[in-house]
Image (cartoon, rainbow, N blue to C red):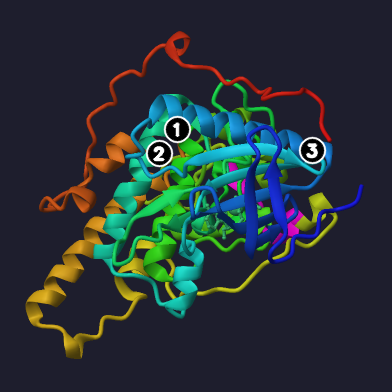
Amino acid sequence: NSDLILAVNAVLVNSDSNRRYIVKDILGQGTFGQVAKCWVPETNNHVAIKVIKNQPAYYHQAVVEISILTMLNQNFDPEDKHHIVRILDHFVFQRHLCISFEMLGVNLYELLKLNQYRGISLKLLRLFAKQILDALLVLRDARVIHCDLKPENILLTTRLQSAEIKMIDFGSACMENRTVYSYIQSRFYRSPEVLLGHPYTTAIDMWSFGCIVAELFLGLPLFPGASEYDLIKRMIEILRDQPPDHILRSAKNTSKYFKHVGVSSRLDENRTGEGQQSAYRFLTESEYEAREMKKPESGKRYFNFDTLEDIVVNYPHLNRKKMTEEEIAKENQSRLAFIDFLRGLVEFDPEKRWTPGQAARHPFVTEEAFTCPYMPAPETPRKPVSQIVTVDHNPGSGHWF
Ligand code: ADP
Ligand code: MG
């Protein structure tokens, strides 16, 4: 089970086509293996190659990545217009599955870091949001769930002076009718239905998308949960809401985090705004500790504000000295539209959460005047499943290496 050590100038070969790839740089490393920047002498350009560890779990995951991405590229985005990374080639080299992709630039987490975690302007954020929504629209039509949307998996293209981005890393993706795994999504971007062990849909990517756009604006994650308990606690506090009863009633993990208090009990007024009644109450830390026999991990507090509204309105300081009154008024107006946009994305109920199409028509995105809360028109039904191209999970030989 020797692992391939990738060094600069090492050569990877696709033995079917005889195409050679010369390693120039290591771009990333993870549990799956490594990503290398490679030069292709045949075409004199660069590609990014993901070299997968030769272990069955990683091999199978990579096979799914190849089949889903190939299907998306060929059948749903043949002209490369929808901000999804292009897969170029795949082959087995010295018992390692290798996947080559178009070469892209820095990821959005690196961009935030380069900007000292100060967040980006709503103007640039709008450009990014449009493109991510464009990709999510394609995924919804294709009935693909990405399952790992986060700033690290959205990359700038290498075109200079452009704000073009692409979605990468379909290594956790699945078809909507084959949701096999329950432990998915990176914690900060994990949706309430996944946390609660409830059946999930493409709506989980919209939750992650909401967390991403909030983070791009703030520079820091909106829900940096140090544990799942801490994550739900933060969501409830910041959103002043909790998962709807119809989810809590049937979800597998509800009793880990909530106490059934019967239909007559009132939920803390502060938390619902509307004073709705819920049959469930979030466990206090000591109740959780007594039930799970361990203290929940709890992390740092980044914002000195309690609600989503207060954080967005107050946290990223305006440099008022450098702005005209008119600019300040416009920024404040944009922030109000942005809060309304976020509200439909980090919505506890996946049925009410906006779809990519509904979010794309929000005034924040379209730049129409924002006057009152956005009420999206209901979505037209999607194509029946029979017309959807299904994925062949078996490129080449069926065994792993
Ligand atoms: P993982 O499943 O380990 O997250 P990714 O596909 O996300 O694997 O790749 C890991 C990292 O490698 C990315 O976060 C990015 O920094 C880099 N990377 C991946 N694909 C590309 C690409 N096409 N161009 C440039 N860098 C890439
Ligand atoms: Mg990744």
Amino acid bearing label 2: Leu
Q: Which residues are magenta?
A: 280-288
Amino acid bearing label 1: Asn
> In the image, is residue 284 part of the stretch drawn in magenta?
yes
- The residue that mark 3 highlights is 57
Q: Secondary structure at mark 2?
A: helix
Q: Secondary structure at mark 3?
A: helix
- The residue that mark 1 highlights is 73
Residue 329 lies, with reference to residue 319, above or below; the image says above
| CB atoms of marks 1 and 3 within 8 Å | no
- The residue that mark 2 highlights is 136
Query: Where in the figure is residue 172, as x and y percent of width and height?
Result: 63, 40
Please identify, in this view, whether the residue under mark 1 or under mark 2 is nearer the observer: 1
Query: Where in the figure is residue 9, as x and y percent of width and height?
Result: 69, 64
For residue 63, the mark is none
Determine crowd level at label 2: few under 14, some 14-19, many 20+ residues with C-alpha closer than 10 A: many
Please identify, in this view, whether the residue under mark 3 or under mark 2 is nearer the observer: 3
123 relative to 38 in the view: left or right: left
Mark pair 1, 2: CA separation: 13 Å
